[in-house]
Image (cartoon, rainbow, N blue to C red):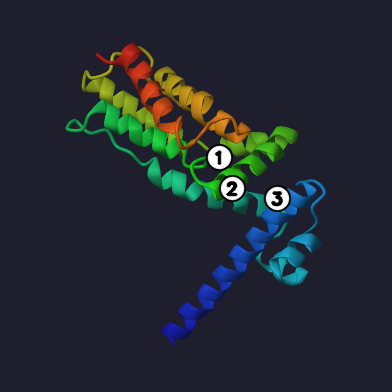
Amino acid sequence: MDTDLSANERRKAAKRDAIVAGAVKAFEQEGFERASMDLVAKLAGASKGTVYKYFRSKNDLLWAVVKGLMVGQNELSQIRYSKDDSLESQLGRFVDAQVYFVVDPGRLSTARLLTSIFVQNEQLREEASNSSHSQFDCLTEWVWAAKKDKRLKVKDHKLAAHVFHGMVEGTINFPALCGTLKMDGELKLMKDEVIAVFLSRYAA
């Protein structure tokens, strides 16, 4: 019985993944506003009824795409301050989490798609912004802990976290989304430089 149930759950997960993949293709082909649930069903190899069985609306599909992209990043960003590890190493892991979207061609393609959707739709952009605080919260807590341990000299730990986050976005993520960053040669250089600049300002 348990085996049958497990197999059934796997089939459901596979069907759901196929629908989400179909949604990505539909959004790429037609744009989010013009893409229809009929097209999603066609590209997913499913009936329209099956699509609605898993997702009530096109917006639900969009957030499923976002969630799928965020899972890996959220896992990587769960970094806790360590007294025994160098600041450079710990900040390096935050950079790795933040650039998770752009170091893989498939994820980068999806990130570009979502960026174009959110740029064009203010309401969706605000909803996405309100639901994407997990990684930044971890970074903010890390800066506070490093400050308490007297290894960082900051007046405002939230501002310092914003500075670090902004440097990574501006020097790595945005150029990667625009296709101007050479991932094989420039990524490590920019990563090391961001960390060095941050620590030159805030290291105790």
Q: How many marks?
A: 3
Report, in whole angstroms, how far the alpha carbon at label 2 lies from the one at label 1: 10 Å
In the image, which disc is placed on residue 131? 1
The quarter of the picture where the N terminus appears is bottom left
Task: Say the numbered circle drawn on residue 117.
Answer: none
Packing grade of label 3 (10 A; few <14, some 14-19, many >=20) is few
Question: Mark 1 or mark 3, which has the lower sequence index?
Answer: 3
| Picture residue at 29% right of the left edge, 13% below the top | 153
Given contact means CB atoms under 8 Å apart, are the residues at marks 2 and 1 in contact? Answer: yes
Q: Position of residue 58 (x, y in %)?
A: 73, 54
Image coordinates of residue 43 in percent, x first then y, are 73, 64
Q: Could you say which is closer to the camera, residue 41 or residue 200? A: 200
Percent across and percent down for residue 200 are 32, 13
Find the distance from the CA under tag 3 to the CA under tag 2: 11 Å
Q: Secondary structure at mark 2?
A: helix
Q: Position of residue 106 (x, y in %)?
A: 56, 50
Q: Quadrant of the C terminus?
A: top left
Q: Report helix, strand or loop for mark 3.
A: helix
Q: Residue furthest right?
A: 34
Residue located beneath label 2 in the image? 66
Q: Nearer the viewer, residue 128 or 194?
A: 194
Q: Residues within 10 Å of mark 2 (few under 14, many from 20)?
A: some
Residue drawn at (23%, 19%) of the image:
151
Q: Amino acid at mark 2?
A: Val
Badge 3 is on which residue?
A: 59
Which three-letter amino acid code belongs to the residue tagged 3? Answer: Asn
Q: CA distance from mark 1 to mark 3?
A: 14 Å
| Mark 1 burial class by Cα count in 10 Å: few <14, some 14-19, many 20+ | few
- Mark 3 or mark 2, which has the lower sequence index? 3
Q: Residue at x 71, y 71 (%)?
A: 46
Residue 154 can be seen in this image:
no
N-terminal of the two: label 2 or label 1?
2
